[in-house]
Amino acid sequence: MLKINNLVVKVKSMDKQILNGLDLEVKSGEIHCIMGRNGSGKSTLGHVIMGNPEYEIIDGQIYFENELINDLPTNERAIKGIYLAFQNPIEIPGVTLTSFFRYTTKKFYPQDMPYSKIRKEIVELLHKFGIPEDTMKRYLNEGFSGGERKRIEAMQVLVYKPKLAILDEIDSGLDIDGLKSIVRYINEYVEQNPNTSIIFITHYSRLLQYLSPNRVHVMINGKIVASGDISLAREIDEKGYLWLENNVGA
Amino acid sequence: MEDRSVMELREMAETYKYDFKDPYLYKEIFDKGLDEDKVIKISKIKGEPEWMTEFRVRAYRIFISKPMPKWGNTELLNKINFDDIHYYVRPQEDHKRSWDEVPEYIKKTFERLGIPEAERKFLAGVTAQYESEVVYHSIRQDLAKQGVIFTDMDTGLREYPEIVRKYFGTVVPPEDNKFAALNSAVWSGGSFVYVPPNVKVSIPLQAYFRINARNMGQFERTLIIADEGSEVTYIEGCTAPIYSSQSLHAAVVEIIALPNSKVQYITIQNWSKDVYNLVTKRSVAYTNAKVGWIDANIGSLLTMKYPSIYLLGEGARGEIISVAFAKTGQHQDAGSKIVMAAPNTSATVTSKSISVGSGRASYRGLVKVYKEAKNAKVNVQCDALLLDPESRTDTYPVIEVHQPNAVVTHEATVSKISEQQLYYLMSRGLSPEEAKTLIIHGFIENFIKELPMEYALEMNRLIALEMEGSVG
């Protein structure tokens, strides 16, 4: 599904390298967790996979379903089936959720499906994620609470049904009940759509107790320094990142 | 009752057909250029009363004596060659035109807009007048029951000479500006609306039928009188780049809102990109009356238009909401004028402009508060959105306050679409073009909200059409 080789990335506007030769492979239907401290480059990784123009790939390759996507525009990546739930979704003044979904769902739903029907489905999904229908009239991400943003970003996995969903810090800004219910619906969705691959990006291990990931990776200084099963996460929980940093000499 | 209506309808259709077939009336095309004889001839052909002939001649003299405006886009203005314009063209010329003769890009727009078959037929010149009349009559019948007059300006002058004489040219006198003087001299077509006291017209008056009238000349004249306690909404020129063989469009619109009345005037201007659109729109609002201009400018080469409200009676209110969309090669010089001359008057102006490519949008606004306007309140908000590095916006606000306790606020913002906004929307599958279109919709959301549903959809479609191919 996703294969990344020796990825080196810098911020376009300054001379700052964020990813320093990163390798990652996610197979169809796998759930991965990427852990790391703030500034380790884990959010950048999500954005580079999505094609954020803020970053420049200096070296390395990103393959999605065996196709090199280094230079593919973001919207084409989305249509191929990559979805990124933003840690900080962008505010779009004056654009209601209704009109946002009217535009975006055109890309993912059958052309002959009337929007009234799509809208009904979306309202049901919102409801499931604890968001009232009124929210459809509000402007996209404007004045949304942290929790509302996370719920709506996560909920869109169920709207666009991507092949690969990257959920960036879905656990920050959410209370424990909110987190539990979001993860439950994502897990449910993955059970029903077993080919979906998911990457959870987080710096807390608390998220992991609700997941059964195939792989857990730890990022330090723009590189994956350790990979393993869920026991790696437990070890980090006990010993902290410092232990790993010392171990790998980073 | 019903029989009579049917008869009336048929009679009117017959009358129209008769007019249409009259070879003298409908094959008249004046030579290019204008002189006093031509002005008099227009009035004669129309069979106008003497006072109107005199009005036209006086206006013509003002037109020739007034210099060109020394502000606005003078470079484009000075390119107008007044000797190279047909000032009076009978409509048959246009009716003859086949659909094939309409420029490709305009045809495409019509086809994609899916505008009513009736209008396409008009452009194609097939039974068009009849089709347009049907639309007109069906509206008219509904309104006639309430005593509302809604007809073209020429008919208005013929059938309601007293009302027309009382108000015509009182809000926009020929002396006002060069183009208002020109319009006053050669006007043809336009709408005449009179709403009797306390009648509330529940559905908007639509200018469909006016497409015929409008093509008779580019100098239409509209007069709307809302009598005491009445309410009316008027919408003009919704669908379209109306194909015009001339490139100068100088209209005058006058609105008289008598005490306690409410008038709303909605325009969606989408002329083809070679048209000079120099329009004078003004209204007077008496005690507790309310006037609203909702004005969108999408088409034309140069638009200079500043809808105005004179708040002359105590408690009168005004609202101007405008959107200007300027693409490469276009200059939308739009704005507003609020004049407050009575106590407790209030007004809001919201202006939104969008510049794409090297398009230029200007806001030119005047707020004038006279000493008499105690407790006057006026709020002006101008927001500009620039899409490209070479896009341009300017704001020229003039505020003149002679009443110390008036509250006048003016706020202006200029914004750009951020890369991260685009990226976010693209991450949900939207192309850069679609993402920009959606952001623009958001930017003018307040404007769209004011429009009746079908016009809101129309407006959205127009913006989407304009954005196609403009991202590169």
Image: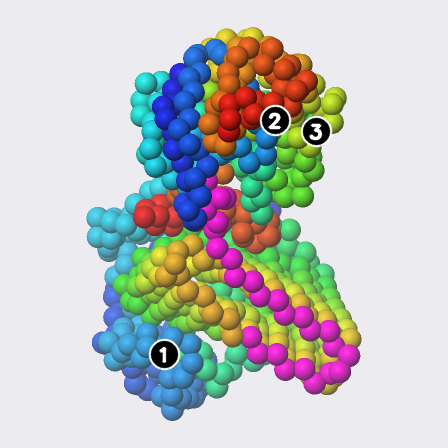
- Asked whether residue B361 is in view, the answer is yes
**Mark 2 → mark 3, Cα distance in angstroms:** 26 Å
Q: Is residue B410 magenta?
A: yes
**Mark 3 → mark 1, Cα distance in angstroms:** 59 Å
Identify whether A65 is placed above or below B472: above
**Mark 2 → mark 1, Cα distance in angstroms:** 70 Å
Q: Which mark is residue A242?
A: 2
Q: Which residue is mark 3?
A: A174
Name the residue at 32% across, 63% down: B329
Whether label 3 touches label 1, CB < 8 Å: no
Name the residue at 64% across, 51% down: B202
| B276 on left or right of B54 | left
Q: Amino acid at mark 2?
A: Leu
Q: Amino acid at mark 3?
A: Leu
- Which structural element holds mark 2? helix
Residue B389 position within the rendered picture, expressed as x and y whole percent measured from the top left? 39, 58
Magenta stretch in the rendered image: B397-423
Q: Which mark is residue B74?
A: 1
Identify whether B149 is placed above or below B442: below
Whether label 2 touches label 3, CB < 8 Å: no
| B337 on left or right of A106 | right
- Which structural element holds mark 1? helix
